[in-house]
Image (cartoon, helix red, strand yellow):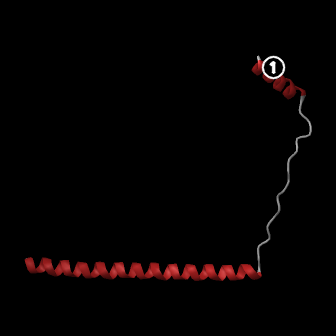
Amino acid sequence: MNGDFIQLLDTGMVLLGIGMGFVFAFLVIMVWTMNGMSACVRILNKFYPEEIENLDKKVKRTNVSDDEAIAVAIAVAKARG
């Protein structure tokens, strides 16, 4: 009974090590691949830059309505006492 438990525990540890090894190797390969693709995109952006829209539209308020002017005047008068 004790020998079977040790053998099963040993087999489980081997499977654990193999599984974690595969996952670690996959993640390392994925990080290397992503870094390589990032470098390729940086190089391609030098030759084919993206166009950037210029959104410098400033909104100017030309007229203030009479109601707003009256409300501001009342608020100023009330604040001053």
Residue at left offset 81%, top offset 21%: 74
**In the picture, residue 73 is in which quadrant?**
top right
Q: Is residue 48 left or right of residue 30?
A: right
Residue at left offset 19%, top offset 77%: 9
| Furthest residue in direction top, as rendered | 81
Query: Which residue corresponds to mark 1?
Result: 77
Residue at left offset 50%, top offset 79%: 30
Q: Quadrant of the C terminus?
A: top right
**In the picture, residue 69 is in which quadrant?**
top right
| Furthest residue in direction front, as rendered | 80
Residue at left offset 45%, top offset 81%: 26
Q: Is residue 28 left or right of residue 10?
A: right
**In the picture, residue 65 is in which quadrant?**
top right
Along the line of sight, the residue nearer the viewer: 66 or 21: 66
Question: How many discs appear?
Answer: 1
Q: Is residue 71 above or below residue 29?
A: above
Disc 1 marks which amino acid?
Ala
How packed is label 1: few (under 14 Cα within 10 Å), some, or many (20 or more)? few
Q: Position of residue 71 (x, y in %)?
A: 82, 24
Element type at mark 1: helix
| Furthest residue in direction right, as rendered | 62
Q: Is residue 37 left or right of residue 12?
A: right
Q: Position of residue 19 (x, y in %)?
A: 34, 79
